[in-house]
Image (cartoon, grey):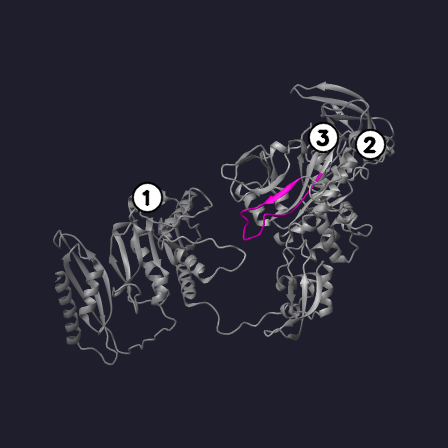
Amino acid sequence: MLVPLDWLAEYVDLPPGTTGQQVAADLVTVGLEEEGLHGGDLAGPLVAGRVLEVVAEPQKNGKVVSWCQVDVGQHGQRVSDGTPQGIVCGAPNVAVGQMVAVILPGGVLPGGMQVEARKTYGHLSAGMICSASELGLSQDSDGILVLEDYLDDTGVRPEPGDDLIGRLGLDAETVEINVTPDRGYCFSMRGVAREYSHATAASFTDPVAAAVQPPVAGTGEGFGVRIEDEAPLADVPGCDRYVARVVRDLDLHAPTPVWMQRRLTAAGMRPISLVVDVTNYIMLATGQPLHAFDRSTLTEPIVVRRARAGESLTTLDGVSRVLDPEDLLIADSAGPLALAGVMGGEMSEVGPATSAVLLESAHFDPRTVGRTARRHRLPSEASKRFERGVDPDIAGAAAQLAADLLVRLGGGRLEDGSTDLDQRAPGPVIGLDPTLPARYVGVDYSQARVVEILTEIGCRVQASRAGSAEGAQSPEPRLDVTPPSWRPDLTDSTTLVEEVARIDGYDKIGSVVPAAPGGRGLSHPQRVRRAVATALAGQGLAEVLTYPFLGAERFTALGLEASDPRARAVRLANPLSDEAPLMRTEIVQTLVEALRRNVARGARDVGVFEVDTVARERGHATAPTPGTGSRPDEATLEQIYAAVPHQSWHVAIVAGGAIERRGWWGHGRAVHASDAVAWARSVAEAAGVGGVTAVADEHLPWHPGRCVRLEAEGRAAPDTTAPRLVLGWAGELHPKVVARLGLPERTVAAEIDLDVVAALSTDRVQARALSVHPAATSDVALSLPRAVPNAAVEASLRQGAGALLESIALFDVYQGEQVAATEKSLAFRLVFRAPDRTLRTDEVNRARDAAVRQAREDHGAQQR
């Protein structure tokens, strides 16, 4: 919101010499943050000049410049000695006899441009003839500013040399403030002036008090209006007050006065025409949006209703819009005239031939206007105010103020009849415990101070007693507070407490660090996720965050069939992008894009991981859409929860390039499928999950020969009778997937279900006693078919070795001349140890032989 200080001073007493910086600082104390300061940065001399001579000089580039002689009066020897000044001007509308604005050498234009005498187009130009845009008076300009068209209505014409900074209002400052959604009343000079009064105790004058409203007209006296809202949102009517006034015999060729143009421009709006400028001026002054219809295009009565099936409306921006049944319309018997509270239609637009207008000043439901504006992607100054809440009490006063201005400035005649269809419900009364502000905020507010503040912001406050359950009066005091009509955000006692703290001063609230209550903190799954992220980052992987949205083509690129459960994704009803309307079912599906982008930008060796949620469909249940007027009942909540997709926590890892870079220390090493398996195992280790085994598996998008399924023994396995739980998959991605996605060759990946990991882990770590007795090591080499997974052989050895086995490790895999072409040789190192004694050789040999025997029985392994 742009707040010109000279306009603000009409409604609140500003001390002489008050600067924009001081006003901004005062408004900050009541919660209106400063966005910027504008104006007041032009430095003179800026003077009136009379054009005495104009010589057009065509240039070789086709441009025509004018060499002008301009009388700028007497300004001392440094600037001008009274002789005409030669100035080069490129504007096409410069002419002899014009009074123009001239900035002389030494002046500074808005934005910091320094003006000096300089040689240009073969002449020494002693200054600059200015346009309205160069002076900051207008957003656009067709040429130089002709003063006869832009001076105030005092009747005093400037003479050459007269200072123009004050005459043109260029010394005025404008404060730009940020208005939060709950403070919609501050989208007006009326609201900002009231807040400045709260901040400084300055005297406030309500601009709507100047409107002398006629008595409410009886039936048939004013223009006919009906409200027929058959589809209200949450039982709230779309329109509860509609005021209409008719002004006839208007001269639409009458210009908007300069003072109004200046204020509109300073407030960020472009002057257009008298009727439009007047309605915009009253909106900026009071916060009440107005709309003017061409009276000759209307058929009585006006009807406020919802759109019907198949209806359309061409709005003032020239776009034909198909209407939705929720759209609230202003219509007559011929059809829609306007989108209520958003924008008018072309059919009833005020044009050059208009001689009578109907002024609409209404109060529309914020949700209805907000939804319509977003549905049609049609934001407007009116909708911005209506969706934040407009004061319904001032609809009549705003219409009267606008009508009076049109009569005074446009020579119109105001009809005697007045339409004011008022169907408003009584305002809410909020019960407030007067001790509540002190208890909530921590400042000792007395009851008298609470009442004083609430009264100051416009509330009506009455003291009462809280009733008991039996109907008897309780001795505890209570305040019955009726919020002012311009504050729809005051809905309960908490919002009133906030107002007390705001007006009394946030700076009076002490900084006290609250004591942390016991028994709270991170949950076990949260601790697991943090431990996993720390462990992976410690291994050199970079944590990233990707958008969880994708398109169906990603499933195809990953090789997933349509029947695969992972390809049946949740579809968003209102996606951020039409190309990505689905929720991911695995993190790898979006994490590969992060790897691809990094490689495309020159990173050769990349390893990234992400900890986040995935979404899986629970079925085809549809969530109901409850109203916003009250809390949904339990049955509705159960239906909503049942329709929410299952979202589990996963961690995914993707890496490509080298895991050990080459250098003077060696040749380096490319990332391998075993690295992905190791990272996946480290996830389980960080969570304290033991007994993890890797089983060869075929699971797209992984390579069928370089993929493992990680399993672990579970204390409990909900919804399954399997003795082991699947943690996830790891390995090398399928070459076709790598090619389709543009990833580095031999890219590896892993995905682990952290919900399963958290369920298997425990907060308690069982310490194991260390044996002081020596270990005994025995190596075995086994020959067996190549198709047998290494992990299966290891599991058989572990099972056969018994309790004395401390650890087992595969340290060599051989395929060559020493074994058959269909076989391989696996060498394992077995470490045995007893907790209470030194093992004898025969004990170690028996355990080793039992392990080999078990592998032979399970897989046909032969000891070499």
Q: Is residue 506 visible?
A: no
| Amino acid type at mark 1 | Thr
Residue closer to the observer: 168 or 394: 394
Mark 2 sits on what residue? 48
The part of the chain drawn in magenta is 224-245
Q: CA distance from mark 1 to mark 2?
A: 73 Å
Expressed as whole percent of the image width and height from the top left, the position of residue 132 reads 73, 33
**Which mark identifies residue 556?**
1
Of tags 1 and 3, the one toward the viewer is 3
| Amino acid type at mark 3 | Ser
Expressed as whole percent of the image width and height from the top left, the position of residue 352 reads 69, 28
Q: In which quadrant is the C terminus drawn?
A: bottom left
Extreme residue toward the front, this view: 219
Mark 3 sits on what residue? 355
- SS label for mark 3: loop
Residue 206 included in the magenta stretch of the image: no
Please report whichever mark, 2 or 3, sits nearer to the chain's N-terminal start.
Answer: 2
Taking 523 as reference, is 280 left or right? right
Q: Residue at x 13, y 55 (%)?
A: 819
Of tags 1 and 2, the one toward the viewer is 1
- SS label for mark 1: helix
Q: CA distance from mark 2 to mark 3?
A: 38 Å
- SS label for mark 2: strand
Residue closer to the observer: 218 or 234: 218
